[in-house]
Amino acid sequence: SSWLEYAEYVGASGIIAYVDDEKEIVVPPVDIYGAKIPLVTLGNDNPNSSHISYIGTNKYELGRQLAKLVKSIKPENAELLIVADTNHNSEATNIMVASFTESLGKTANVRWNLLETGRDKNISPDEIIRQTFIKKPEINMVICLSLEDTLRVTQSVIDLSKTGQIKI
């Protein structure tokens, strides 16, 4: 927010802002004449923001591409786990998962589940992931939708000595 206020002060002709939570609404600052300074958002989109443009991943296309990737691996009896922090970007995750499901179709050799790591505030995401691997030893493939979850999954796979059994 202080950088947006600074943009007002220096008379910026435009602003590019990274938004890491789809629920966040970035209000563009105004210039000394009261006109809004044009705002472009990156990362996540909130259609209610007053931006002139959004630059980021098309979540529907991401779901299609993930399904295409899974199909290209040609897994036998795949037990896929999609790990997502839906606490911050639930709408984007829902769009991606719907597209993934539609694109994957009824592929007989792939079963999958969505693991939402951001829902339970009483248990750390690390422990949620670890317990999932323990309770579902059949998981042999994981897709992570964030850098943080990728690191958590990788650490759990190493800690549980499943490095040759689970593809990330």
Image: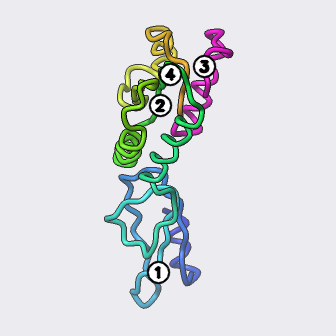
| Residue neighbourhood size for the residue with mark 3, other residues' Cα within 10 Å, grouped as few (<14), some (14–19), many (≥20) | many
Specify which label sits upstream in the sequence, 4 or 3: 4
- Nearer the viewer's eye, disc 1 or disc 4? 4
Residue range corresponding to the magenta coloring: 144-168
Q: Residues within 10 Å of mark 2 (few under 14, many from 20)?
A: many
Between tags 3 and 2, which lies in front?
A: 3
Give 115 or 9, whichever is nearer the viewer: 115
Kind of residue indicated by mark 2: Val
- Image height check: is 67 above or below 8? above
- Provide the residue designation for mark 2: 83
Q: Please give the name of the residue rendered at 51% of the width and 78% of the height, measured from the top-left corner.
A: 8
Give the quadrant of the C terminus. top right
Q: Is the residue 47 above or below the residue 107 in the image?
A: below
The residue beneath circle 1 is: 37
Q: Secondary structure at mark 3?
A: loop
Whether residues under marks 4 and 3 lie with C-beta atoms below 8 angstroms apart, the answer is no
Point out which mark residue 166 bears: 3
- Calculate the distance from the C-alpha at mark 1 to the C-alpha at mark 3: 48 Å
Can you give x and y, in whole percent of width and height, for residue 6 in the image? 55, 72
